[in-house]
Amino acid sequence: MRNRMALGGLLVAAVMVAPASAQQDRALAILDAASARYAAARTVCSDFVQHLSVPLLKEERTGKGRLCQAHPNRFAMRFTDPAGDAIVADGTSVWVYYPSLDAKQVMKFPMADAPGGYDLNRAFLSDPGSKYTLTYEARESVVGHPCHRIRLVPKTDASFKSAEVWVDVSDSVLRQVRVEDENGSVRTLTFQDVQLNADVPAGWFTFTPPPGAQVITPPGGGGRAGR
């Protein structure tokens, strides 16, 4: 009887573990397919809507615009609302300029202090199995596209607590990303008109501080600049 009970316990444990392992494998396969799609593209551009919730400040902010990135390390997120706000990674530095908050201040970070922080594809799609504990959450629609929703929890110290990504069922592109910081702030980016190998406007990855603006390089740099 004791042996039968022990065997029964092992079978129950196996049944309980199997679904979690299957979820992990399914999530990893979906992210790997998306990673291959983005790795093959020389550029990626899309329109975006960003919603930022900051419970500590009791603030909710929404913005929109267009972002583009190009291999290996150029990225620019330019807002049309608030007009003129921008984050630009030119391959050497990351420039953060929010004239909607302060037209006379520009933040400048060395890119080496923010690896992957401004590259959503590299952050969430590159080698996700080694960086995150993955869970396949559900199948949901985002801006009219059926998507897989996957939760990612960092296995080691990271600049955020957890993230969720929505990957298009039909073409493996990112349709939405939600990131929760340790302080409870939540940033949600929703992407429309996603174009791989898009033509990027001239000067998109170049930033020139406006006349009279003070350029500030914070000690230690790094992190994700939020607005």
Image (cartoon, rainbow, N blue to C red):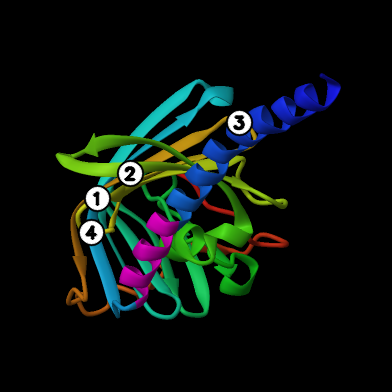
Sequence-first tag of 1 and 2: 2
Whether residue 82 is visible, yes or no, is no
* Separation of marks 3 and 4 at Cα, in angstroms: 41 Å
* Separation of marks 3 and 1 at Cα, in angstroms: 27 Å
Whether residue 121 is visible, yes or no, is yes
Residue hosting label 1: 169
Nearest the viewer among 99 and 148 is: 148
177 vs 186: above or below? below
Q: Is residue 212 magenta?
A: no
Quick check: marks 3 and 4 in contact, CB under 8 Å? no
Q: Quadrant of the N terminus?
A: top right
Magenta span: 29-39
Q: Position of residue 209 (x, y in %)?
A: 41, 68
Quick check: marks 1 and 2 in contact, CB under 8 Å? yes
* Quarter-of-image position of residue 29: bottom left
Mark 4 surroundings: few (<14), some (14-19) or many (≥20) residues within 10 A:
some
Residue hosting label 4: 46
Mark in the foreground, 3 or 4: 3
